[in-house]
């Protein structure tokens, strides 16, 4: 295949104020960059939309640079090499890379990891075998220092990360696993298919009251994807020496005013609670361990996962907004091509 003259890409048109809208994005046709020595041209097949991308739409300093207005967004994607000027990758190889939100991407061979579609479908490398899976594994076992016999509470438990946290905790010997989600269907998914001991719909009443019923003797580990009232409730019900892994705070991602902060943070003093934020990239020693264990669990049928798939690159903004509102169960993906 020769290099195409144009391809579709999704750009950040304006920075959102509060919740993103369709007007914050533009879908355009653009000429892919020339492929130079050591590079490959990739035709993207599937891409990821993730909560962290919302923070990158603000013009604020963070652990990754903000998206540039007028430029294509980026993020995890899997695609097929269609032009190669690299000795490491051949035409037809499927690769994982970081230039999603576009139909065609040009990357250096070092920025693309070859995947084996015989082991798992391409989308799995963006979810259970990708960054969300790695975040679940790292956050629970390293940041939260999980111990067999722990009672574990996971917020946002039906999402890409939370759904895996609960299952890993169960496989590693948790005494009790509790999850929160945003619908009765998701609660049933957690307790039925995924094996959570208890789950509740946070829309049904105060989180503190529902968590107290699900964990009458308290919790040892809290995996936080949500922040806000979930974090407050977990602080109240934490046992002495509890460990919190702070992965995300999606409940506050689209608020225009800064949050007041956890109201119950004094609980951390009296109970000796550890609150530890973490980034997957800060645990560069774990990918091989994670891949081996998660791959084994998948092969044995001990880990279950779901994907919510939206078709068409032009629908990526809607998929992203829907993900922020909790419309997905499991990993939200955008199918760009077959």
Image: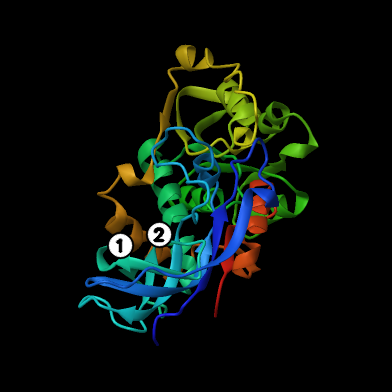
Please provide percent x and percent y for residue 172. Answer: 42, 49
The CA distance from mark 2 to mark 1 is 8 Å
Residue drawn 62% across the image and 40% down it: 16
Residue 216, can we see it?
Answer: no
Is the residue marked by circle 2 packed among few (<14), some (14-19), or many (20+) residues within 10 Å? some
In this rendering, position of residue 206 left or right of residue 115: right
Check the image and report above or below for 308 versus 213: below
- Residue that appears at 55% across and 77% down: 337
Q: Please count the marks in the image.
A: 2
Q: Position of residue 35 (x, y in %)?
A: 31, 73
User: At x 65% / y 31%, what residue is drawn?
Assistant: 255
Q: Do the CB atoms of the residues marked 2 and 1 lie less than 8 Å apart?
A: yes
Q: Is residue 141 above or below residue 79?
A: above
Q: Position of residue 188 (x, y in %)?
A: 71, 54
Examine the rendered structure and indicate whether residue 58 appears above or below residue 88: above
In-front residue for pair 118/17: 17
> Does residue 201 appear to the left or right of 166 in the view shown?
right
Circle 1: is it few (<14), some (14-19), or many (20+) Cα within 10 Å?
some
Q: Residue furthest left?
A: 87
Q: Quadrant of the C terminus?
A: bottom right
Please report the residue visible at 51 percent of the width from the left and 24 percent of the height from the top. 239
The residue that label 2 is drawn on is 98
- Quickly name the residue at label 1: 111
| Front-lying residue, 58 or 322 | 58
């Amino acid at each position: 295949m020769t290099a195409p003259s144009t391809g579709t890409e999704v750009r950040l048109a304006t920075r959102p104020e509060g919740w993103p809208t369709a007007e914050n994005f533009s879908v355009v046709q653009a000429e892919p960059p020339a492929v130079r020595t050591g590079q490959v041209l990739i035709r993207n097949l599937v891409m990821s939309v993730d909560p962290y991308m919302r923070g990158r739409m603000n013009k604020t300093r963070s652990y990754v640079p903000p998206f540039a207005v007028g430029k294509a967004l980026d993020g995890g994607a899997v695609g097929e090499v269609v032009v190669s000027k690299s000795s490491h990758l051949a035409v037809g190889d499927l690769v994982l890379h970081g230039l999603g939100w576009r139909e065609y991407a040009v990357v250096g061979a070092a920025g693309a990891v070859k995947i084996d579609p015989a082991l798992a479908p391409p989308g799995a490398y963006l979810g259970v075998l990708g960054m969300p899976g790695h975040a679940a594994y790292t956050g629970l076992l390293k940041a939260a220092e999980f111990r067999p016999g722990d009672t574990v509470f996971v917020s946002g438990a039906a999402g890409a990360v939370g759904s895996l946290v609960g299952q890993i905790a169960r496989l590693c010997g948790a005494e009790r696993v509790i999850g929160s989600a945003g619908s009765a269907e998701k609660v049933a998914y957690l307790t039925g298919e995924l094996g959570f001991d208890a789950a509740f719909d946070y829309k049904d009443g105060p989180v503190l009251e529902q968590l107290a019923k699900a964990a009458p003797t308290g919790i040892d580990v809290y995996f936080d994807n949500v922040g806000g009232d979930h974090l407050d409730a977990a602080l109240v019900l934490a046992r002495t020496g509890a460990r919190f892994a702070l992965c995300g705070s999606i409940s506050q991602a689209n608020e225009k005013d800064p949050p007041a902060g956890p109201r119950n943070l004094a609980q951390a003093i009296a109970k000796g609670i550890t609150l530890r934020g973490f980034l997957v990239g800060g645990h560069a020693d774990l990918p091989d361990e994670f891949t081996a264990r998660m791959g084994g669990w998948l092969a044995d049928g001990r880990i279950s996962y779901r994907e919510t798939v939206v078709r068409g690159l032009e629908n990526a903004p809607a998929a992203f907004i829907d993900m922020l509102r909790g419309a997905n169960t499991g990993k939200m993906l955008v199918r760009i091509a077959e």
